[in-house]
Amino acid sequence: MAPRPGLAMVFALLAAMCCELAVSAAAPSAASDAAAAAPCAACHGEHGEGMAAAHVPRLAGQAADYLQKQLDNYTDGSRDSPTMTNFAKALSEPQRAKLAVRYAAMSAAYLPEATPLSAQALARGHQLANQGDETKRVQACNGCHGPDGMGVPRAAPYMAGQSAEYLAGALKAFQGTRKNDAGQLMRSVAQRLDDADIAAVTGYFASLGASAWIIDKGQPLATPLP
Ligand code: HEC
Ligand code: HEC
């Protein structure tokens, strides 16, 4: 789904804010760290809840090591996004680490999907998540992403409660430009999924949000808040 015209405008304005961020990144200090979070919240939400319609991911409660790796990957080019590359490049390395820890510690309300899946698609999604598909040589997602897709810190991100729009975009990216998965773990999975599988499995994970512990609690903090 393409972002609505209103959102495109917001994005253009926010992209312009990037330059102010670059100024604060040049002289890291407590004040500039606080300022660095502001442009993020405009898209990712005050509580890291994301914006499904614009394919902006939820960050709340995602493991800090994963978030930091993504910010590093936007700067080193192994993950490509016209939006995020500029924002990540404007941050110093300590700022990237601090923002990752901050979002990992957040909790945000679950936002239910606007268009729930059919029972048949939900069943297919459940199958891919829990058993995989031997005929297509697709491993069960939860083997890496944890029971109910709740994520495994230092291994794989959570998918429960993430929007279907964002997850589907990420799988398409792994079929194309996203090359930041160690050992090509995700690229080899993504290339075996067709569009119907992608719709089923991402809709299934999005639908799990309400019951996932991660939505309420966030990740336990390994390090104190900056
Ligand atoms: C203009 C909107 C916008 C702003 C501002 C923005 N982001 Fe993003 N962010 C996005 C979008 C869209 C994506 C998904 C891009 C993709 O598909 O790779 C994303 C992806 C991410 C991811 C990857 C999450 C994942 O699950 O893999 C992280 C981490 C992130 N942003 C952190 C930040 C931080 C920190 C800031 C502030 C410095 C920020 N973003 C500012 C729109 C934005
Ligand atoms: C062999 C382990 C493994 C399996 C199996 C696996 N994944 Fe992943 N997945 C990963 C890892 C590791 C990452 C993080 C890669 C990185 O560093 O960006 C990831 C990332 C993702 C992302 C990006 C999330 C984000 O926030 O950007 C999506 C979407 C995803 N996987 C979907 C799936 C689906 C759907 C399946 C099942 C059909 C699946 N994965 C099976 C290991 C796996």
Image: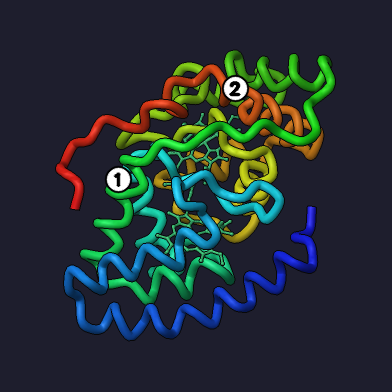
Q: Position of residue 125 (x, y in %)?
A: 70, 22
Q: In terms of depth relative to the viewer, which is nearer, 217 or 129?
A: 217
Above/below status of 18 relative to 108: below
Whole-angstrom CA distance, mark 2 to mark 1, is 23 Å
The answer to whether residue 66 is left or right of residue 117 is left
User: Residue at 45% of width from left, 62% of height from top?
Assistant: 40
The answer to whether residue 74 is left or right of residue 130 is left
Question: Is disc 1 surrounded by few (<14), some (14 to 19) or many (20+) residues within 10 Å?
Answer: some
Q: Position of residue 183 (x, y in %)?
A: 42, 44
Q: In terms of depth relative to the viewer, which is nearer, 223 or 198?
A: 223
Q: Secondary structure at mark 2?
A: loop
Which residue bears the numbered disc 1? Answer: 65
The answer to whether residue 110 is left or right of residue 165 is left
User: Residue at 76% of width from left, 36% of height from top?
Assistant: 114
User: Residue at 30% of width from left, 49% of height from top?
Assistant: 102
Question: Does residue 121 appear in the picture of this structure?
Answer: yes
Which residue bears the numbered disc 2? Answer: 208
Q: Position of residue 99 (x, y in %)?
A: 31, 56
Quadrant for residue 38, please give it.
bottom left
The answer to whether residue 39 is left or right of residue 72 is right
Question: Is disc 2 surrounded by few (<14), some (14 to 19) or many (20+) residues within 10 Å?
Answer: some
Q: Nearer the viewer, mark 2 or mark 1?
A: 2
Specify the label residue 205 is tagged with.
none
Question: Does residue 144 appear in the picture of this structure?
Answer: no
Count of marks, rendered view: 2
Above/below status of 43 relative to 112: below
Going from the N terminus, do you reach mark 2 or mark 1 first?
1
- The three-letter code of the residue at mark 1 reads Asp
Assess mark 2: CB under 8 A from ligand 2? no
